[in-house]
Each structure stands twice: as C-alpha cells, then as structure tokens.
Amino acid sequence: MISGALNDVPWYDQEIAHPNPHPGLPGSGADELGPFAHYADHRASGHSVEGLRMKQNADQRRGLAVHFTLLVAALLSAAPAHAQDPLLAGAAKVDITDYEAGPANDPMFARALVLKHGETTLVLVAVDAVAIGEIGPIKNDYLPTVRSRLEKELHIPPNNLLVNASHCHGLVCRDVADRTIQAITQASKNLVPVTVGVGSGHEDRISENRRLKLKSGREADVRHAYALPPDEEVAEVGPIDPQIGLIRFNGEDGRTVAVLYNFACHPIMGVPGAANTADITGFSSRVIEDNLNEGKDGPGPIALFLQGCGGDINPVDYKAVDHPRHAEPLGNTLGLSTLKGLRTIEAKPDPRLTVLSETLTLPRADQEERIAAQEAELRQLLQSLKGTSLNLKTFLPLAVKYNLAEEFPSYASHRYLHDATLGRSDFAKLDEENRRNLQAYLQNILTMEKLTRVQTNLALLRKHQASLIASGKRTIDVEVMAVRIGEAVLVTFPGELTVRIGLGIKKTSPHPRTFVAGYTNGYIYYAPTAEQLKNVGGAQEDSDCILAPEWQALFEAKVADMLKRL
Ligand SMILES: [Zn+2]
C-alpha cells in the first residue's frame, strides 16, 4: 500500500489528491542487449526496448554487454566529422514504472535521445518522474551514477548529459539509474543520419496560471493543500506559455526517429481510481509515438517531453469536484497539438550541435524575518477567531434557507404578513439574529482557510531555513546548460522556473527558436521571479524556494552570456 506513504512524503504535498491505494503488480521486463551493429545496419531495429525481456543467462548477458559497450564507445569517440556530415540521432525508451507500488494506469518511461556530430555527443533523457534528486523516488546519487557510467562505458563526457524530469508525480522503480543507462545504450545503438526540423505548436486549452493576484496586493495559489481564497478577493491571474517548442529528427527514409517537445505545465492531474500514472505528458508522448509515423513500416518515433517553466502553471480544472479528474484528455489534447505543430515543420540537413554546461553560484534566501512575520500573522488570525452560537449542523441548513428565500427565509410569506398585521416583528428579529450568527460563523471559516494557507507555507519556509542553517553556506551551485541543436537552442535550470522566467528568456534571446527547460540536471525547488519573491509566505512557489531574489538577474545574465556563445 502506498496511499499512506505518499501522504507522508514532503514532495507529494497534496499537489495531487490521488494517492495510489493498491498493492503490487509484477515488475516489467528489462532491456535486452543485442550485439552491436553499425548504425546503418540497424535502421530496421526497434527504437523501443519497452517490454523486452532478458533471454540470455546472466553470463551471456555480461559478455555481450561488454562487447556491445566497447563498440558503442568506439563509435561515440570517432574521428571529427566534416561540417557537411549529417547529424546522427538514435532514440530508445525503457519502462521505469514501480509496479510494486500498486497498479499502474499507464507506464512511466526513461526516454533517451543520443545526438552526435563529429566529436560532440549530446545525450538527452526525459524521465517521467517528479524530480532528478532531492524529492521523490529518484535519489541524489542518480545523476552522478548515470554520468560516471556513461563516461566509463560509452566515453561520453559527463556534462554532455541533459536529464529532464516531466514533474509528474508517478512512482518509478528503484533501479531507475540502471534502466536510464539501458535506454541511453540502446539509443546509441540506434544512431542513424538524420535531418532536423525546428518549430513550434500552440496549446492554450489545458493549462492555467495558478498564482492569483489578490485585491490586497498579496498573491495566493491554486493547490490541494489548502482552500482557494474567496472569489471576490481575486483581482487578476497571470500568463501561461502556450508554445510547444518542437525539434524533430527524421531518418533518410523520411521516418521520424525522435521528437523533442517542450511545454510548461505541472502534470499533476492524476487519473480516476488514483493509480500510478505518468500523467498528462505520459499520455501526450503516447499520442505522438502512436500516430507520427502512421502508415509507414518500421519502428515508431520516441517522443521526449521536456518540462518547461511550469513552476506556476497548473492543469485547468485542477480543483474540480463535480467530475473525476483525468489527465488523459488533457494529455491527448497536448499530443494532438504537438502533432499538428510537427506537420508544419520541414526537416533539413543541419548538423549543428553545441553543448555548453556551466556552474552558476546563486544566493540562498535567509527567511528568518519572513518567518517571524508569518508567525505574527498566524497569531493574529488565531486571535481573530470569535465564539459563535452556531455549529456546522445548524449553520449549513440556515445558510441554505437564507440564500434560498432572502425575504422570507424562516417560514412561508403569509406567516410574516400575519405578524405584520398584528404589529409584531418576531420573525424579522429572528432573521436578523440568524444572519448575524451566520456571518460570524462564515468569518471564522474564512479565517480558518487563511490559517491553513499561512500555516502550510510557513512550514515550507521553516523547512528551507533549517536546511540553510544545516548547509552552513549562503550560496548554492547549480548546473545551467545551453545547447544548440540545428536551428534550436535550449536552456536548462534545475529548479521549477515560473512561466514569466521562460517567457522573458524567449523574448530577449538573440535566437528565434529558444526553448527553456526547468527541472533539469538536479532539483532546487521553485524558482519564482524576484517580484514574486516579495510575496514569500503567500504562495507555494515563493515559499517552497531556497533562492534569494537576486538569483533571477544572475541566472538571466548567465543565460544571455551562454546564448551569445551558441
Ligand atoms: Zn511543482
């Protein structure tokens, strides 16, 4: 049973109210390592290694694995190519679902894409998981393990690996690092010459900005961890990014080998029945993979989803209570819009491949004062709770009556008229008293809702303040990547970038096709704008954050510098 366990882990944090209640199913098959053949001979082999089972015994497997690895390494460290040589691309996916955690509605995958031109190799991995380390099932040793094995076994420089987490809240298996290596190794084996197409799709029906600007000047957010603020307090909502950034890689036969698609949205809708799921972006990848090469023989493409700046972007209807929440229709919509965008893109020979990976030192926030302010607000809210005559049992029917019949709520109209003819006003006075009590009780409820928001966000501030003190450091080093793939450039960051950061980078970039992926090569919680950080304590993004406001200018300067060098 994982229902209780999920509610206990801090990253789960009720972003999704779909704990998985059922015991395990059998595990998935592992990748079968076949003998290596040159990419040209391997065009007809499957890109997907999903569901394949080990057939050899352990000794045979080991022998073949060593043989295969040496050959792949030899290919990956080949002599420099000429500028006119084609880009090589190979892709594969491996099932990483934790089948022991309970029933899976749909599988989670590690999808790998290996790109190579001359001496430059770039490995992109898209993982259906909440984060790369720090929170959730993927531990902090995952990235160093995958990188050192890549270097040892495939001679790929560790910093030429880009791993993006979709941020779905599905549960992945414990040997996810091994399976990631399997996917990358298989992708290396599938290398073929490709043309590259870059463009974008558009989807504005499935996401919404979850930060709500209040009339008070503060901001609240849309979460399952607490109630929404009252409708009349909400003044405005923020933007979304409807762009789907697209890069497609076509083989010489015109088939699409792989698609990279970049979009900003928390994939946290869940599925009815609360089974394990790769959520919205798992469904969208499936739609793309099932339909893109339709009518053509041979393997389907691998669709790698790269989560964008989804820090404050939720699925629409995230708090719906009138129908079961379901990620599949949203994912199918995203998948179809991606396919629509892909149809407009022409793939051309363009072997440009550049990889920059650099460390950026960012200041951490000291939240001592903000914590004190939030604690004071908590005390003030508590003290404002007043004794009331009503309880829930008497409040609910009164609330219905007084909203149903404003003029004569307590009985039929003739009774009021009868009183009036006799010069009495007993019913009118009763109504006055009831209305006063209803208002007092309602005020307590609204205060209670506010208390839950302040208390939940205060807990996040306290957690990060404790970690700041324990670290003994006022800064944190993060990895920023900037890569060029043909016409496209892609910038990465390990935090949950809010959408305005991504929109800003796209606007100011010197490259027309600039895409931004948060949640990449590590996890450092939310990364809201300096402006949003004035609201610390008010919304999850500004409270579940370890960065000081100055981080934004430093990051944007770093990105501008790296973009110039691409
Ligand atoms: Zn998140």
Image (cartoon, rainbow, N blue to C red):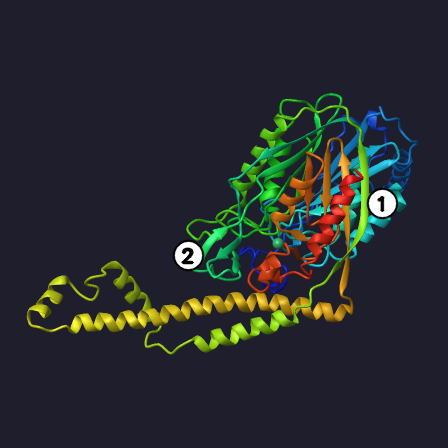
Identified by mark 1, the residue type is: Leu
Q: Estimate how packed mark 1 is, as few (under 14), some (14 to 19) or many (20 or more) residues with alpha carbons within 10 Å.
A: many
The total of numbered circles placed on residues is 2
Q: Is label 1 in a helix, a strand or a loop?
A: helix
Question: In the displayed image of the protein, which residue is found farthest to the top?
Answer: 253
Q: In the displayed structure, does residue 370 sit left or right of residue 157?
A: left
Question: In the displayed image of the protein, which residue is found farthest to the left?
Answer: 421
| Quarter placement of the N terminus | bottom right
Q: Nearer the viewer, residue 82 or 253?
A: 82
- Whole-angstrom CA distance, mark 2 to mark 1, is 52 Å
Q: Decide if residue 132 is in sight here.
A: no
Q: Nearer the viewer, residue 302 or 362?
A: 362
Residue 280 in percent (x, y) is at 58, 44
Residue 82 in percent (x, y) is at 88, 26
The mark nearer the N terminus, 2 or 1, is 1
Point 82% across, 52% down: residue: 145
Point 69% across, 70% down: residue: 466
Q: Nearer the viewer, residue 47 or 198?
A: 198
Question: From the viewer's perspective, is residue 217 above or below residue 103?
Answer: below
Identified by mark 2, the residue type is: Asp
Query: Which quarter of the picture shows residue 302?
Result: top right
Query: Which quarter of the picture shows residue 393?
Result: bottom left
Residue 511 in percent (x, y) is at 71, 35
| Quarter placement of the C terminus | top right
| Closer mark to the observer between disc 2 and disc 1 | 2
Question: From the viewer's perspective, is residue 97 above or below residue 401?
Answer: above
Query: Which quarter of the picture shows residue 85?
Result: top right
Q: Is label 2 in a helix, a strand or a loop?
A: helix
Q: Give the residue pinned by disc 2.
A: 231
Question: From the viewer's perspective, is residue 438 above or below residue 301?
Answer: below
Q: Give the residue pinned by disc 1.
A: 150
